[in-house]
Image: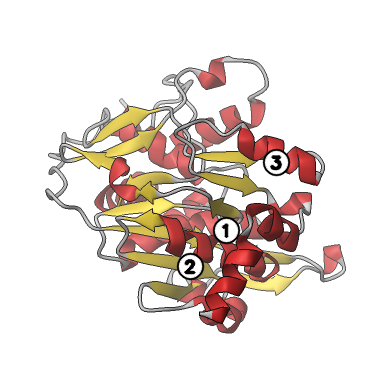
Amino acid sequence: MNSRFVPDVATRIEPLPRAPSAAIVTASYAPDFERCRLLCETMDRHVTGIARHYILVEHRDVALFRRLEGSSRTIVDERDLLPRWLRAFDDPLSLFRRRVWVSLRTQPLRGWHVQQLRRIAIAAHTGEDVLVFCDSDVAFLKPFDARVFWRDGETRLFRRDGALAKDGHDEHRIWSRNAGSALGIDPIKASTHDYISTLIAWRRETVKAMCERIEKTHGRDWVSVVGSARKFSECMIYGRYVDDVLDGAGHFHDPVEFCRVHWNGEALSDEEFRRFVDAMAPEQVAIGMQSFIGTDVGRIRRLMGLDRWSNSRKSV
C-alpha cells in the first residue's frame, strides 16, 4: 500500500479543559475596514465567553487596523504568520487594483486565498483552546455566548450532512476533493459533507496536528501544499481532517448556522434588509452582508439602529 494513504496511528484526543479559553479570529483587509469596525462594535456589545479577538491582516494594513485594537483585541501582521517566501504585490493584470501573492512554491493567490491561510496559521501563535472564525462583514444583532461551541470536553464542528451529494455544489466538491488530497486521504474515500460557514469553531491543537499531517504526507511546508491548488477551502480541510482522519474525535457535529448571510445578488433595499433580519431563525444571532455586494455600511448601521446607539455613547 502507498504509505501516503496509510492512516496515522490513532492519536488520543485529550478533552478540552472544563472551562476552555476561546478567541474569535477575523481575517480582513483595508477595503473592509468599516465593516470590520462594525463587527467589533457589535461583538463588544453582544458577545460573551471570548478571551480575545484576533484580526489578521496584510502588513500594509496593520497601521489602519490598529485603530480597532484594545485590551482584548489584537491586530496580527500576516508577516508573523506566513512564510516570507510568499510575497504580496499590486497585480498589473488588474491595472494594480488588486493584490496577488506569488511564490515559486504555490499558485498565484488572491486575498481570499491568503485570508484562509492566515486562519489556519494563527493556531500556531495563540494559546486559546478554541478558535471561533467570524468574517469581517458580519454584525451581531443579539446576545451570543461562545460557550455554545463546546460541551463535555468536545468542540462543535459545523457540518451539513450529505450536502455535496445534491445538485449545485460543484465548486464545493472540488474544494472537498482538494482537501482530501492535501491530507493524504485515499481519493476513493470521497466526502459528501459541507463544512463551510461563518461563526464556526476549531480546536487549536487539532489545527496544529492537521498542519503536521499535511507536512508529513507531502514532505514540505503545509502552506506550499495548500497553495498549490487555487481551489481550496480551509473549512473543508479542517472538516475532512476531523472526520476522515480523526474519525470525529474531540468534536460533535451540528448543522445549525448562527449567522444569516446574504451571499450574493444585489444590495438589499431598506425594506428588503428589514425582511432579511425578520427572517432570522431563532438560533441566529448575527447577519452577514457579503462585502462584494456593495451594501453601504452606513445604511446597515442606520437600519440596525447603531447610529443612534453610537451617538448616545458619545453623549454619555
Relative to 291, is 116 on the left or the right? left
Residue 143 appears anywhere in the view: yes
Q: Which residue is mark 1?
A: 136
Evaluate if marks 3 and 1 touch, with contact meaning CB atoms under 8 Å apart: no
Q: Which residue is mark 3?
A: 274
Secondary element under disc 1, as helix, strand or loop, is loop
Circle 3 crowding by C-alpha within 10 Å: few under 14, some 14–19, many from 20? few
Evaluate if marks 2 and 1 touch, with contact meaning CB atoms under 8 Å apart: yes
Residue 59 position, x and y percent, is: 56, 78
Circle 1 crowding by C-alpha within 10 Å: few under 14, some 14–19, many from 20? many
Q: Residue furthest right?
A: 95
Q: CA distance from mark 3 to mark 1?
A: 21 Å
Residue 152 sits above or below residue 80 on the image = above
Relative to 296, is 187 on the left or the right? left
Q: CA distance from mark 2 to mark 3?
A: 29 Å
At label 3, the amino acid type is Arg
